[in-house]
Image (cartoon, grey):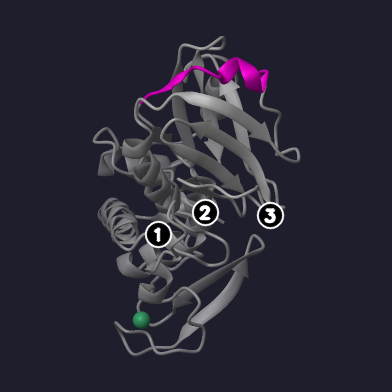
Amino acid sequence: MPELPEVEVTRRGIDAPLRQARVVAVRLGKPLRWPLGVAPDDLVGATVGPVQRRGKYLWLPLAGGRAPGGLLLHLGMSGSLGLVQRPGPPGPHDHFELDTTQGLLRLTDPRRFGAVVWSPSLTEGPAAKLLAALGPEPFDPALTPQRFHASLQARRSPIKAVLLSGEAVVGAGNIYACEALHSAGIHPALRSDRISRPRAARLLAAVQQTLQQALALGGSTLRDFKDVHGMDGAFQHAALVYGREGQTCARCGGTVQRVVQAQRSTYFCAGCQRR
Ligand SMILES: [Zn+2]
């Protein structure tokens, strides 16, 4: 499932090439998670502004046209966006296409949990509703170690589940949560409210470093993710515990284990990740 780094990699891939592009046509394929919420033709003639990201959502501002506002995009479980200069006909999994004067933006999504939703702005309409529950961004300076610790103190679930919920910080999806907990030396089953202030600070730093490394490596491709040029991410090869059950821990020489927590695989090393 595309997580924050994959979405940010996608944002960086489309932002500059689509800046000031004019929409010439919009094509919808099979239904996605939510309806578009506007007549596709009403977007024709609009101009694309700077692409933004919030959590795992992308915001594509559209100025002008008959429906000024923008599109909120989500890659769902299996989506990826491609920017194609000489597009062939859409494939069976291509369910949204924004044809512009600077290339065709195409959403390929085999499982169709992705979404493209029109909204009058980021702070009104469907976008405001969808973004309201998101926790703080990992690189927001307002997310201090103190604030992160307070947020962990307010929750009694295992820390791995709290990271996945995105309530304390967005972006630590399964692979990144496993890696950050390993890096910070914290056992994934440790109760969130039992984490001391120094360990919370170490964990926040580990989440930030893990996401930075993932961005530098083009994200992770566990199954379907491709960047806008069709390239796989490489972070999964750099992971120290994720997907490495039975292998030797690179840090302490222990053995990496896999357990299932809340129906998700957790990989960790009992040698160096303490309760
Ligand atoms: Zn270890």
Q: Residue furthest right?
A: 30
- Whether disc 1's CB lies below 8 Å from ligand 1 is answered no
Q: Which residue is mark 2?
A: 2
Q: Which residue is mark 3?
A: 110
SS at mark 3?
Answer: loop
| Quadrant location, the N terminus | bottom right
- Position of 239 relative to 121 (above/below): below
Question: In front: 246, or 152?
Answer: 246
Which amino acid is tagged 3?
Answer: Pro
The residue at 38%/34% (across/down) is: 18
- As helix, strand or loop, the secondary structure at mark 1 comes to loop
Three-letter residue code for mark 2? Pro
Residue positioned 50% across, 48% down in the render? 82
Mark 1 and mark 2 in contact (Cβ < 8 Å)? yes
Q: Is residue 42 magenta?
A: yes
**How far across and down, in percent of the image, does residue 52 sit?**
38, 32
Q: Earlier in the sequence, mark 2 or mark 1?
A: 2
**Quadrant showing the C terminus:** bottom left
Q: Write the start and end of the magenta stretch as one range.
A: 38-49
How much space separates mark 1 and mark 3, taking CA atoms? 19 Å
For mark 2, give the secondary structure: loop
Q: Which residue does the numbered mark 1 point to in the structure image?
A: 219
Sequence-wise, which precedes: disc 2 or disc 3? 2
